Amino acid sequence: MKNMFKAFALTTMLGLSLVMQASAQAAETVRVASSAAVCFCFLPAAFGTELGIWEKYGITVDLKSMAGDARVQQAMVADAIDIGLGSGPGIGALSKGVPAKAVAAIMYRPAGMALITKPDSAIKSAADLKGKKIGVTTGGSLTEWLARRAGTGAGLALKDFQVVPLGDLSSNTAAMLSGSTDAMVYGSEAGFAMQVKGTGRVVATFDSIVPHFVAHTIFVTDKFRSQKPELTKNFLKGWLEIITYMRNNKEATVDFASKQLNLPKDVASMIYDVNLPQFTRDGQFPDAALEILNESFVELGILPAKVDVKALIDTRFLPN
């Protein structure tokens, strides 16, 4: 009897080992790059590895962060990545020869972006930006477009305020605190962290300023979509499953966000509450949001005129 039990145990262990080996062999590496290192909007890419969800879909995510949409697009042109996580306005660049399509919307209203100023600033709303300088990341970026929308949406003309491209968070923060600029547009993570520390104040998050939009998007290269359609589908299935988990498990998500984004838990909790409702449930692109995106292409100088945005989008790989 003992020998039979040992034989059964060995057979079971061998079977499990073979299954695990087959699973490991079946997993394919997908090269993914995000356009920002610290953004709750892109958290699912790393969280999926932590949760084992990518493994479930036969995927190993090789994740990198890059400084802005332009870098992500350059990486897709160079075939250095398969999937890019970037902004909605980045879709406009696809018409300039970037060999990729937008395959899924990540977030709608840009709750992940905030208008930030000094704690003692007289700026209480976007209407107070008249005569002020607003720091952004780069020209032609989502941050520049949001800065413009903040002012014009409050009834100001573009000549009434100045948008200043300054680069990364440290450069924008230094300029604002020194008085070189009066406010900045950056991730709400940074804004709430500064608010907790007493070094800054969030005037508003942009979900209240831009009601119809696609703030962040998943891009997949033409090569990857054509050569690995099933893997593309599985990536999107996994992504949406991670979002569902995040929606149903706040505490675990806040814990992971706190560690991954290097934020205090109370700040990560604020970010969760502001951002989570804006994550899409199905990845689709609403027509009203696409119309605003089309306007952003022209306003930012990405394109000289409106285009057929749907020609830059491929939603065939989204789950039905």
Image: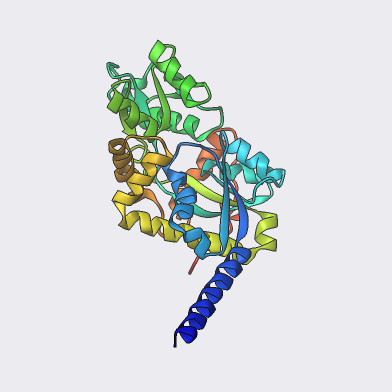
Among all residues in the image, which is located at the extreme front? Answer: 2
**Residue furthest bottom as drawn:** 1
Identity of the residue drawn at 70% across and 62% down: 227
Residue at 51% x, 39% y: name it: 296
Query: Is 21 placed above or below 121 here?
Result: below
Residue nearest the observer in this picture, 75 or 265: 265
In-image side of 122 versus 39 (left or right) = left
Q: Is residue 53 above or below residue 204?
A: below
The percent position of residue 4, horizontal first and vertical second, equals 48, 86
Q: Tell me where residue 106 appears, x and y as whole percent.
A: 46, 51
**Colour scheme:** rainbow
Q: Nearer the viewer, residue 194 or 19?
A: 19
Q: Residue at x 56, y 74 (%)?
A: 14
- In the drawing, does residue 58 fall left or right of residue 134? right
Tell me if I can see residue 282 in this picture.
no
- Which image quadrant for residue 115? top left
Would residue 245 be seen by someone viewing this image from the given angle? yes
Residue in front for this viewpoint, 315 or 160: 315
**Residue 217 point in image, percent of width and height:** 51, 48
Residue 194, above or below 268: above
Tally of numbered tags: 0
Q: Position of residue 285 (x, y in %)?
A: 48, 55
Relative horizontal placement of residue 245, taking residue 162 as reference (left or right): left
Quarter holding residue 67: top right
Instruction: Check the picture and name the quadrant holding the N terminus.
Output: bottom left
